[in-house]
């Protein structure tokens, strides 16, 4: 395991999401950890070149056959031996939904499915590769952990944490060749426990994944407009940190921000938790609305979806205005 | 060689030139290998289709052609441009809000009927189209271009069996057999072995040709068997036409840097910009 220091934090951010994945798998192989990695003809993009060369007995390239990959992984995995299976996020989830349902849901196989390039992180490939609903697929399968880490350090920690337990897990990777640096040396990671990024008093913003960095920028814009924000990283979408969400009652508004469909992802999970906690406060979920984004650069796609920092801030301010108007009418 | 084939050969070079010079406008990753391998196949199909009196536009072609290997989109755009069916697309390739994405996407402007890139979807879709065409009593052939790596997908074999069951002799599948996929050689990942024999055993009319030879492709396209779907296994070279890309899987999807771009341009007969 890498020591958490500023040099390694920079190193992990420069590696990109898949680079960090490759690093974790390589380190585990060097430590002779019990695991098996599989990919569907995406060994190189998964960052697996070093294990493919140096630890060929730890890796299986299944070919372009994602559903077969998941089934083979199920045959290999057991409590002590996690099977890591990688593909681009829509193929890792939608195409393998039944395999995930049976092997990971019903049979509780120790498989860690890694959905790569999720959200809008394959921008130029177009809609066939966008990961807009992968979390929803994974969320619908009973009993699997769903984790969406936000920066290089958190991807590193999330993957290592998942490899240490025997739970079926979906890990959603977002980010291009470089990653934001959100966390510093005091970083702690525990599956199921949200991280507080910044404390404020008016609005609670809950995010996860790469888009958390845009959310932090949005919070800065809001601060300049006199709106004090708490920003939290809900890296584990399932099981969600209900204890943390109890604090939502302290704010005028709770907002979720996700690079995913507004259906079935972080927003849905937080809203459900708030309703179970009986917190009847204004809520708004920002994500990809009910459409398929069209091709372009990542920043273009974010604007198209209203998920760039300025749009996020703007949408939150409009929601607050509405709440104020309603209150004055009442 | 007849004038027809000389003309098509000339087009090959120009199409590759169009593709390579797209890198003047787009310095990002491009799927070079699998686009360059199927230039002759797509050119043959388009030339063949355009000979029919009722085929005059990209919409007409796309009604009859499904490019299941969506990452070969650049080759299809370049072929369409070669025939004057679309304007110069190079500046708009991968552009914000444009229609020329790296993988093929459905849209009215280009008339693409099937979004591809999620592999293993194009053949079953084409089977449905061919079936409907038959049911409507139309005399229309459906062509589908698929990669050899794509044959790894289980959905391919589900539709291979179903197409034979339904005796879809109006379906013509072309496999771009370039022997490479993203991670390496197909033999080292999932070997396809006797692909022609496998198709035959499933009741298909199957043949293997050189996928860069216009006469061979032409002959294969004219070879129909009543009551059976046809597969043409087109033996090709991944990255064909650019020496450093040929048979090298790292050029599956890669940035073409300045120096190599100049070399590639020289190899396809383009002067430096």
Image (cartoon, rainbow, N blue to C red):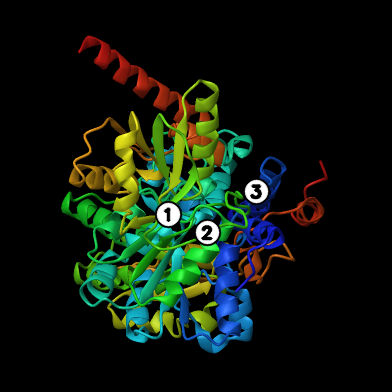
**B135 vs A142, nearest the viewer:** A142
The residue tagged with tag 1: helix, strand or loop? Answer: loop
Where does residue A162 sit, x and y in percent of width and height? 43, 70
**Which residue appears at 61% of the width and 67% of the height?**
B238
Q: Image height check: is A278 above or below A71?
A: above
For image coordinates 18% across by 51% down, the residue present is B137
Q: Position of residue A281 (x, y in %)?
A: 25, 32
Are there few (<14), some (14-19), or many (20+) residues within 10 Å of tag 3?
Answer: few
**Residue B271, can we see it?**
yes
Q: Are labels 1 and 2 assigned to the same chain?
A: yes
Left or right position of B235 against B239: left
- The residue at which mark 1 appears reads as A235
Residue sitting at x 35%, y 74% = A70
Same-chain check, marks 2 and 3: no
Q: CA distance from mark 1 to mark 3?
A: 31 Å
Q: Chain of mark 1?
A: A
Q: Does residue B61 appear left or right of residue B19 in this picture?
A: left
Camera-side mark, 1 or 3: 1
């Amino acid at each position: 395991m890498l020591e958490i220091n500023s040099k390694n934090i920079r190193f992990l951010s420069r590696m990109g999401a898949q680079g960090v994945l490759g690093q974790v798998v390589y380190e585990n192989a060097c430590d002779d950890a019990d695991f098996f990695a599989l990919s569907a003809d995406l060994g190189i993009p998964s960052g697996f070149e070093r294990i493919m060369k140096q630890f060929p007995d730890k890796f299986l390239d299944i070919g372009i056959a994602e559903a077969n990959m998941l089934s083979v992984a199920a045959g290999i995995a057991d409590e002590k031996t996690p099977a890591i299976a990688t593909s681009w996020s829509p193929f890792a989830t939608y195409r393998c939904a039944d395999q995930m349902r049976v092997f990971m849901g019903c049979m509780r196989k120790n498989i860690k499915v890694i959905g790569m390039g999720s959200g809008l992180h394959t921008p130029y490939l177009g809609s066939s590769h966008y990961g807009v609903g992968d979390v929803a697929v994974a969320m619908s399968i009973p009993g699997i952990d769903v984790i969406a880490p936000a920066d290089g350090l958190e991807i590193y920690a999330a993957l290592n944490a998942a490899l240490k337990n025997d739970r079926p897990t979906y890990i959603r990777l977002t980010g291009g060749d470089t990653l934001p640096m959100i966390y510093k040396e005091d970083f702690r990671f525990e599956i199921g426990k949200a991280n507080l990024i910044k404390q404020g008093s008016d609005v609670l913003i809950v995010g996860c994944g790469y888009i958390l960095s845009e959310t932090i920028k949005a919070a800065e814009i809001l601060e300049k407009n006199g709106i004090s924000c708490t920003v939290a990283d809900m890296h584990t979408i399932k099981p969600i940190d209900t204890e943390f969400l109890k604090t939502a009652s302290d704010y005028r508004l709770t907002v979720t921000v996700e690079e995913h469909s507004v259906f079935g992802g972080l927003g849905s999970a937080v809203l459900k938790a708030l309703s179970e906690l009986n917190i009847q406060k204004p809520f708004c979920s920002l994500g990809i609305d009910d459409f398929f984004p069209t091709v372009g650069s990542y920043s273009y796609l974010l604007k198209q979806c209203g998920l760039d920092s300025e749009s996020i801030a703007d949408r939150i301010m409009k929601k607050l205005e509405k709440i104020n108007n309603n209150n004055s009418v009442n | 060689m007849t004038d027809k084939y000389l003309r098509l050969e000339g087009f090959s070079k120009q199409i590759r030139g169009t593709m390579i010079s797209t890198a003047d406008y787009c310095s990002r990753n491009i799927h070079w290998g699998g686009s360059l391998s199927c230039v002759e196949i797509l050119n043959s199909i388009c030339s063949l289709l355009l000979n029919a009196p009722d085929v005059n536009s990209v919409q007409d072609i796309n009604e009859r052609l499904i490019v299941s290997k969506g990452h070969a989109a650049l080759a299809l755009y370049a072929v369409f441009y070669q025939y004057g069916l679309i304007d110069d697309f190079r500046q708009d390739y991968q552009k914000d809000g444009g229609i020329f994405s790296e993988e093929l996407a459905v849209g009215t402007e280009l008339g693409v009927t099937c979004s591809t890139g999620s592999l293993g979807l194009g053949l079953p879709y084409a089977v449905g189209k061919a079936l409907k065409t038959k049911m409507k009593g139309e005399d229309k052939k459906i062509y589908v271009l698929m990669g050899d790596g794509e044959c790894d997908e289980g959905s391919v074999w589900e539709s291979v069996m179903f197409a034979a069951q339904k005796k879809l002799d109006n379906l013509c599948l072309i496999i771009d057999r370039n022997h490479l996929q993203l991670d390496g050689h197909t033999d080292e990942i999932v070997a396809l072995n006797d692909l022609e024999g496998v198709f035959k055993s499933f009741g298909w009319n199957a043949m293997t040709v050189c996928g860069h030879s216009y006469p061979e492709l032409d002959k294969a396209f004219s070879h129909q068997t009543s009551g059976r779907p046809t597969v043409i296994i087109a033996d090709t070279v991944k990255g064909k036409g650019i020496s450093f890309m040929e048979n090298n899987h790292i050029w599956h999807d890669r940035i073409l840097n300045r120096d190599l771009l100049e070399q590639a341009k020289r190899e396809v007969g383009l002067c430096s910009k």
